[in-house]
Image: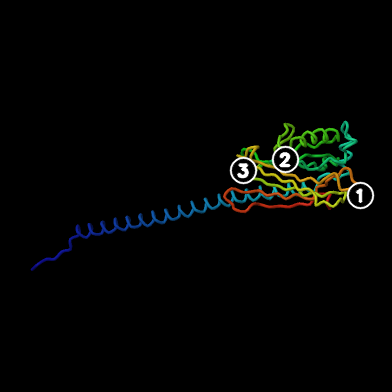
Amino acid sequence: MINLKPNKQGLNSQEHGFALLEVIVALVIMALVGLMAWRGMDAMIRGREVIDRRANQDADYSQLVRQFEKDCQSVLVRDELSSLANSQAGGGANGGAVSAVASGAKNIWFLRRYRADNVDAWVIAGYGMGPSGLQRWTSKPLLQRSDAGALWFGISRDPDLASSDLLLSLEVPTVVRQAFQVQTSVLSGAGTSGISASGTGSPNATTNASTSTATTPSTNPPANSAPNVSNLLPEQQGVVMQWWIKDVALPITRSCLMGGAL
């Protein structure tokens, strides 16, 4: 009679091999799940970084637009400019010809009102292209009319030359080019369409490549025209600014009516 006894050693070997295979499969599955989880976390972190970077850029653009609109709307009016010019030596004769905006080939400057600690003051703010993008410069609050006039007349003589008395208040590295246009009108009403001044600026632009154009009306009207005006004094009515962002086709465009035009 044949005695059939189970081979316990064989069964144990098969059971051990099957358990090891399960462990290997489980480890592989866990590794795949961990890899997918890591890739998901990495994508989420990268997306968060992109969102934060874009949010910071949008905040810079919003701050730039707000500062520009505030600077433009707070410029001095003609009466304030006349008193400012009269505070300078020899300013009494040409006080009315002082402008609240000075534009060159690359930079544009605003002479604006500022209130510091319940005290009226003046501030000079300017926009131009620097080596690392668009920059906004400001002076400290000028409480004395003579100090404001001296600094402003120095900037007006050469708007593209930054003064050492100015501080960097805002920098937007992603802006690669700036363009502006100042729209003016002639208050005397001698039948002219006004003055248009424009300029552009970029980090790599040279002085010869940047141009600034200005068309001034004739100061000697025909004899049969009336009234007979000897000096036509323009007044700024508004500014159109354009900022080009890196890798973006269309620029940020903002227009603003100045305080004297309202």
Sequence order check: which comes first, mark 2 or mark 3?
2
Horizontally, residue 178 falls left or right of residue 51, namely right
Crowding at mark 1 (Cα within 10 Å: few <14, some 14-19, many 20+): few
- Residue plotted at (72% across, 46% down): 198
**Do residues under tags 3 and 1 come within 8 Å of each other at their CB atoms?**
no
Callout 3 secondary element: loop
- Name which residue type carries label 3: Pro
Q: Which residue is mark 3?
A: 173
Mark 2 and mark 1 lie on one chain; the one further toward the N terminus is 2
In x, y percent, where is residue 184?
A: 79, 49
Q: Which is nearer the eye, 29 or 199?
A: 199
Give the residue at mark 1: 227
Residue to which mark 2 is pinned: 104
160 with respect to 85 (left or right): left
Is label 2 in a helix, a strand or a loop? loop
Judged left or right of residue 4, residue 91 is right
Residue 160 location (% of width, % of height): 71, 37
Q: Are marks 2 and 1 in contact (CB under 8 Å)?
A: no
User: From mark 3 to mark 1, how far is it between C-alphas?
Assistant: 51 Å
Nearer the N terminus, badge 3 or badge 1?
A: 3
